[in-house]
Amino acid sequence: MFDCMEALGMGPRQLYDVTSRGACMLRKASPFFAGLDPFAWTGSASVQSVETQSTSSEEMVPSSPSPPPPPRIYKPCFVCQDKSSGYHYGVSSCEGCKGFFRRSIQKNMVYTCHRDKNCQINKVTRNRCQYCRLQKCFEVGMSKEGERRKRGCGMG
């Protein structure tokens, strides 16, 4: 008679030796040996084994890698019609107009137009007149309140 059982193989379709003396790691705990009573065995040095088969779904169907999510597509920048990088200060805007608006608001900038305060603002001309660019930012709906609060700045 043996006091405990020890498994030698732990993978699918491997044989388990339940006769060797060892660390008692499977005694009463393993579903593989349910109903086997090691204390009822007779004879010395007899070898008994149990064969198991895995039913894990991950072994039956190989998983294919999932495709990456499609890139986000935003509307063009509402100020200059350049490629938008997302919604900033409440509207879809490019990095250039986002930065221009942020600096203008933070520094309380006052600009002047050297023409008739009706300059065309687009990707090519947006840097020619800061006054008209800032006015267009306000016209399309940019506002300081539209910006999300930054993480870790101490403001909840």
Image (spheres, rainbow, N blue to C red):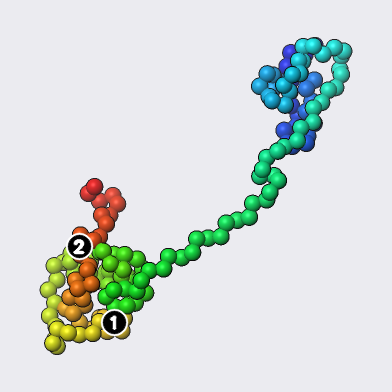
Q: Is residue 120 above or below residue 40?
A: below
Residue drawn 14% across and 83% down?
117
Residue 19 appears at what percent x and percent y?
80, 20
Identify the amino acid type marked 2: Lys
- Helix, strand or loop at label 1? It is loop
Task: Pick whichever, 72 or 47, lies toward us.
Answer: 72
Hey, which residue is sitting farthest bottom in the picture? 115
- Helix, strand or loop at label 2? It is helix
Residue 54 appears at what percent x and percent y?
72, 37
How far is disc 1 from disc 2 in space, using C-alphas? 22 Å
Residue 102 sits in quarter:
bottom left
Kindly identify which residue carries mark 1.
122
Q: Is 57 left or right of 49, judged from the image as shown?
A: left
Q: Is 66 left or right of 145, judged from the image as shown?
A: right
Residue 13 appears at what percent x and percent y?
78, 36
Residue 95 sits in quarter:
bottom left
Kindly identify which residue carries mark 2.
144
Q: Is residue 77 above or below residue 24?
A: below
Few, some or many residues within 10 Å of mark 1 (<14, 14–19, 20+): some
Identify the amino acid type marked 1: Asn
> Can residue 96 be seen from the camera position used here?
no
Residue 119 appears at what percent x and percent y?
20, 85
